[in-house]
Amino acid sequence: MSDRFARSGRSWTALVVLAAVWAAIFAAWLMLDAAWWIVAGLIAVTLPAAWEFATARQAWLCVDADGLTWASGRTKGQVSFEKIDHVRLETRLDFSPRVRLVLTDGKRLPLPPDCTPPHAQLEPKLRAQGLRCERHPFALL
């Protein structure tokens, strides 16, 4: 049994948000006569999102009989279930989810946020593999 969650950097949401931001920047440039260096700075801030959309970077997490395997950009990792003591499912104050693997040696290994599914989707799959999951709503650090 293998469960895989994948997310692509190329989505309609990313395209619409990027187009709306660029339209607002160019409207400010044309209608409000914004300085060219302000427009260039604002466009530069959006370039990482444009690059992610153009390259369609893949992020994924796989839960199978061997353990957890994930990839996000150049970051890849794999941990067997025997090395995992428990899993912390945290919700930060901005409502973004965070998943941390607490290993048997006490180290905490955070999973990249773009490769993790929602907690409600991930928790049953982890419990089915015999892992203990701890929920921590509104974690600060």
Image: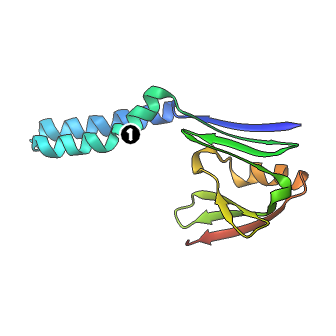
Quadrant of the rendered image containing residue 31: top left
Picture layout, residue 28 above or below residue 140: above
Question: Residue beneath label 1, please?
Answer: 48
Quadrant of the rendered image containing residue 90: bottom right
Task: Determine if residue 32 is in view.
Answer: no
- In depth, the one of 54 and 39 nearer the eye is 54
Task: Determine if residue 3 is in view.
Answer: yes
Quadrant of the rendered image containing residue 64: top right
Residue 97 at what x, y percent from top left?
62, 57
Residue 74 at what x, y percent from top left?
54, 39
Report the quarter where the N terminus lies: top right
- In depth, the one of 34 and 66 nearer the eye is 66
Horizontal side of 141 relative to 101 (left or right) equals left
User: What amino acid type is highlighted by mark number 1?
Assistant: Pro
User: For the point 24% across and 40% down, which residue is it?
Assistant: 25
User: For the point 68% across and 50% down, which residue is it?
Assistant: 118
Residue 96 at what x, y percent from top left?
57, 57
User: For the point 66% across and 59% down, which residue is it?
Assistant: 109
Report the quarter where the C terminus lies: bottom right
Q: As drawn, which residue projects farthest toward the bottom?
A: 140
Q: As drawn, which residue projects farthest toward the front?
A: 105
